[in-house]
Image: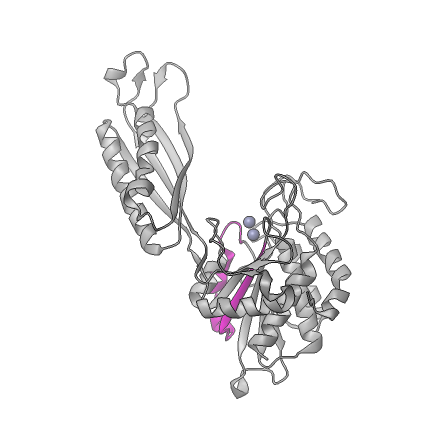
Amino acid sequence: MPVNNMIADQADEMRQWRHFLHTHPELAFEEHQTADFIAGKLTEFGIEVHRGMAKTGVIGVIRGKSGGKSGGARTIGLRADMDALPIIEENNFAHKSESDGVMHACGHDGHTTMLLGAAKYLAENRHFDGDVVVIFQPAEENGGGGKVMCDEGLFDQFPIETIWGMHNWPGLDVGKAAIQHGASMAAADGFQITLTGRGGHAAMPHLTADPLYAAASLIQSLQSVISRHLDPLDQAVVSVTQCHGGFTHNVIPDDTFIEGTARYFNPAVGVMIKDRMAHITEQVASAHGCTARFEWIEGYPPTINDAAAADRAALAAADVLGAGSIDMDAPPSMGAEDFSYMLQKRPGAYIWLGAGHPGEGAMLHNAKFDFNDELLPLGASYWVSLVERELG
Ligand SMILES: [Zn+2]
Ligand SMILES: [Zn+2]
């Protein structure tokens, strides 16, 4: 497995950066110390730094041999996310979070470090033509920092032609990667429903319009969107995740509140789910003498890889991991990712880098999760291989 030699030599240094970031996690749009750390490193590597996009975003521009936009030289963007999660860490190692209730439980500390490691190598060696834009994006977990960067002109200010992302992937062996030719991650929309009836005495339900009874019926009926309205060859899920109503044992309440999420890959499926859910909600509420307020909250769109870019990403990953280690047939994930907004603007690919099989429960977003440091040189080498292939 030919990890780049110079990157292998900086593995210890990268581990120290990663542990520093893990110790100092910050939530969405509050990544000030993280941004300072990244900008400090990029400056130390002699890389041009731009700050302030999407509040805490950091962008570095690494000029290749021929540099700049002249002479038909090309520009590619490599993106890492930098935010943490509101989780109380349950690990006890030396690099445990020092911020109460905030934790790097998705490995964004590792993603940031792998891109920093690649940036250091690329700045020292510059075995490419054109420009590499390294993008450190805030607020992936919450707030859609990827969208904010697009809205604030990431692709206008930097002439990025292709855009590339990576996530560590527990459950996939270390030394393997998976890349989809199309959909990689799902769209994640939300819904909120308030059913309003007429409360009253629990012993005299015939004198009320019971919104709890309507909610029970509605929660079941909403699943018919998936089982009866979705083409069985398409993929989607609807989950009701909250239901609140009532306050004591002998009173039927006036209102009941329901909340949940819908995940899908095909935007037309998203429209169908929303329309069917709105219709069913109104009809079921009406059948029980209630009224309904239905609200749809648009979330991250699906993450769709460009097929040709996915093939090129696979070749770059194979340089590091070996051709037999790249899975191009892995099913996509129902999780969501705001790198999707960048892929809507430019072709590119998002790859999953195998992170091994951590102990039970230590999956992404678990309080015992820790980024696997074995991946640091692999991920950084992938970035370098991708740059030298794309801009070689
Ligand atoms: Zn996450
Ligand atoms: Zn993540």
As drawn, the residue found furthest toward the front would be: 324
Could one spot residue 145 in this view of the protein?
A: yes
Image position of 229 (left or right of 326): left
Residue 215 x, y percent position in the rendering: 33, 29
Please check the rendered image and state whether residue 284 is part of the magenta-colored stretch, yes or no.
no
Identify which residue is drawn at 31% across, 29% down. Answer: 217
Identify which residue is drawn at 58% across, 59% down. Answer: 177
As drawn, the residue found furthest toward the bottom would be: 71
Image position of 19 (left or right of 285): right
Residue 199 x, y percent position in the rendering: 30, 21
Q: How is the image coloured?
A: one colour
Q: Is residue 119 above or below residue 31?
A: below
Span shown in magenta: 140-168
Please check the rendered image and state whether residue 157 is part of the magenta-colored stretch, yes or no.
yes
Q: Quadrant of residue 212?
A: top left
Q: Quadrant of residue 5?
A: bottom right
Q: Is residue 266 above or below residue 50?
A: above
Image position of 28 (left or right of 21): left
Q: Is the C terminus in the top left, top right, bottom left or bottom right quadrant? A: bottom right
Residue 195 x, y percent position in the rendering: 31, 31
Could one spot residue 58 in this view of the protein?
A: no
Nearer to us in this view, 353 or 346: 353
Q: Quadrant of residue 118?
A: bottom right
Identify which residue is drawn at 38% across, 34% down. Answer: 258
Q: Is the N terminus in the top left, top right, bottom left or bottom right quadrant? A: bottom right
Residue 391 x, y percent position in the rendering: 57, 78
> How many callouts does the rendering have?
0
Image position of 292 (left or right of 309): left
Q: Is residue 68 above or below residue 26?
A: below
